[in-house]
Image: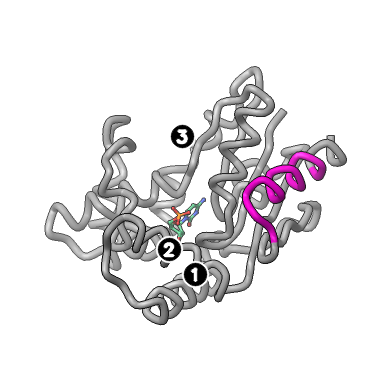
Amino acid sequence: MIIAVDGPAASGKGTIARRLAAHYGLPHLDTGLLYRAVGIGVLRAGGDPSVPAEALAACGFGEAMLHDPQLKSEAAGKAASIVSAHPEVRAALFTRQQDFAAQPGGAVLDGRDIGTVIAPHAPAKLFVTATPEVRADRRWRELVGAGLAVERDHVLTDIRARDERDSARSAAPLRMADDARLLDTSALGIEEAVAAAILLVERAL
Ligand code: C5P
């Protein structure tokens, strides 16, 4: 059983994927972390994420890198969305994601292209979204909660820029798979969103 969860930044897809994994007893991979690890790797090497060769050189990171707290930073998210536009970076991370999806008992993966590229045959696909304003508000609360002084408008501008980069790129752009089920979490709390996700998965299986 493979569950593919895709959607834009701060849509709730990560939380939903984690909760689905716990509900069904499946391993979970947040594929955004892979791109964040590459982005941070380039920045730490003093490189430029927009240069494909420099991004590719950062793709050989080890498992420990995926637990680095800096991966969650806005800088990592921005660098991730830049390196993820390079087809060579996507190709370098492809097998790792496919192997995870192919585990005998199944898996839950969340990202931007799980239902379209990584696991196109997944029986259950969700596309989780919310309005840019709601997503910016969630992200802003998270950042403020973590003690960071940021403007809500600035977060909204960043979210829109990231949406634009993720949707406009030619390599695996963010788009809903034809056979995915749409879950708009704009008006839903976490528990409501998780319950709705479980219902959609049950219907798909
Ligand atoms: O989901 P998260 O915000 O951690 O992803 C960071 C960036 O990595 C995204 O903006 C996107 O550009 C990229 N990404 C991707 N494909 C995935 C997961 C993330 O291109 N499967």
What mark, if any, has residue 96 been given in the picture? 3
Q: Could you tell me the amino acid type at mark 3?
A: Arg
Specify whether tag 2 is near ligand 1 (CB below 8 Å).
no
Q: Is residue 142 left or right of residue 197?
A: left
Q: Secondary structure at mark 3?
A: helix
Q: Quadrant of the N terminus?
A: top right
Q: Determine which residue is flagged by label 2.
A: 141
Residue bounds of the magenta highlight: 188-200
Q: Determine which residue is flagged by label 1.
A: 137
Q: Is residue 89 left or right of residue 99?
A: left
Q: Is residue 136 left or right of residue 148?
A: right
Residue 43, image x, y percentages: 19, 58
Res 107 → quadrant: top right
Please determine whether, in this image, residue 37 is positioned above or below residue 165: above
Q: Are marks 1 and 2 in contact (CB under 8 Å)?
A: yes
Q: Nearer the viewer, mark 2 or mark 3?
A: 2
Q: Could you tell me the amino acid type at mark 2?
A: Arg
Q: Nearer the viewer, residue 185 or 110?
A: 185
